[in-house]
């Protein structure tokens, strides 16, 4: 399932709930003592891409 969160050009203001962000698990990492490895859904490999842009923050 593809989920897109687009907050651009819609006058978004306020806080994003931590509970909401924790529900997005496509890029979740499994950590053990010294290593972090990606957790994938099923046996198939896929690659996600995220672009984050901050504008006007100094």
Image: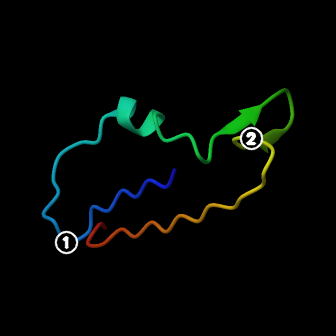
Residue 19 coordinates in the image, percent (x, y): 38, 29
Tell me what residue is drawn at x 72 percent, y 44 percent. 40
Vertical comparison of 53 with 7: above or below: below
In the picture, residue 11 is in which quadrant?
A: bottom left
State which tag comes first along the sequence, 1 or 2: 1
In the picture, residue 34 is in which quadrant?
A: top right
Tell me what residue is drawn at x 79 percent, y 40 percent. 36
Tell me what residue is drawn at x 48 percent, y 41 percent. 24
Residue 18 coordinates in the image, percent (x, y): 37, 33
Between marks 1 and 2, how big is the CA–CA gap? 35 Å
| Left/right of residue 20 with respect to residue 11 in the rendered view | right
In the picture, residue 8 is in which quadrant?
A: bottom left
Tell me what residue is drawn at x 45 percent, y 66 percent. 52
Vertical comparison of 42 with 7: above or below: above
Q: Secondary structure at mark 1?
A: loop
Q: Residues within 10 Å of mark 2 (few under 14, many from 20)?
A: few
| Left/right of residue 28 with respect to residue 33 in the rendered view | left
Residue 42: mark? 2
Q: Secondary structure at mark 2?
A: loop
Residue 9: mark? 1
Residue 41: mark? none
């Amino acid at each position: 399932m593809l989920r897109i969160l687009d907050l651009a050009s819609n006058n978004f203001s306020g806080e994003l709930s931590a509970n909401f962000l924790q529900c997005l698990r496509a890029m979740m990492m499994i950590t053990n003592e010294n290593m972090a490895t990606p957790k994938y859904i099923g046996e198939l490999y896929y690659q996600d891409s995220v672009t984050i842009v901050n504008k006007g923050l100094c």
